[in-house]
Amino acid sequence: MTDQLVRLVAWSADDLELLRRINTPDMKKHLGGPETEEKVLSRHQRYLALPNGRMFRVALAATGEPVGTIGHWDREWQGEQVYETGWSVLPEFQGRGLAVAAARALIEAARADGRHRWLHAYPGVDNLPSNAICRKAGFELVGPYDFEFPPGRAMVSNDWRYDLRKP
């Protein structure tokens, strides 16, 4: 899947180093902090074998250089099955519209899967960049909700959703 700025490439065994590059205090400050190497390896294995969803490397369309990650997976939310999405863009590539382009390309990937009507994102209310990405990519703000993420850490997140049935 491509957008003018980025291309989504199916997650592969070669993407472990990208996951490590994203596992920094700055990149994980809204997600409970960096993970141990064991957890990074476990996450990588989960991404390789997602049973109900897909994980992607975000690459620059022009050069193929990896700039981040994005994916979608099944989640039960408010009594129905939906897709959830999440992303990361490396600091040196932030502020260029790449995450918005990746989110728009991901919307098309989730739409193509066709199993659910809604795609949701749940950035923390204090994560201003991710909330802006949701807005710019066309998600609708539903409202704030209390979450526990990672397990044992309370946080308030915004629920943004995108109707995959709209043209």
Image (tube, helix red, strand yellow):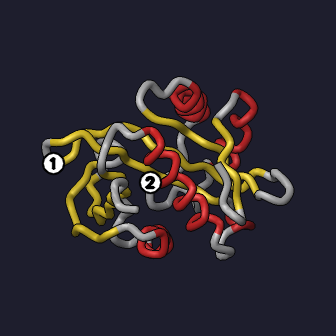
Q: Is residue 167 above or below residue 126?
A: above
Local crowd at mark 2 within 10 Å, few (<14), some, or many (≥20)? some
Task: Give the spatial CA distance, label 2 vs label 1.
Answer: 22 Å
The picture places residue 82, in percent across and down from the top left corner, at: 29, 44
Determine which of the numbered discs, if any, sits on residue 65 in the image: none
Q: Quadrant of residue 16?
A: top right
Q: Which residue is mark 2?
A: 31
Secondary structure of residue under mark 2:
loop
Q: Residue furthest right?
A: 63
The residue located at (56%, 67%) in the rendering is 100
At label 2, the amino acid type is Leu
Question: Residue 157, can we see it?
Answer: no
Q: Is residue 132 above or below residue 147?
A: below
Front: mark 2 or 1: 1
Label 2 vs 1, first from the N-terminus: 2
Q: Is residue 22 left or right of residue 143?
A: right
Q: Which residue is mark 1?
A: 78
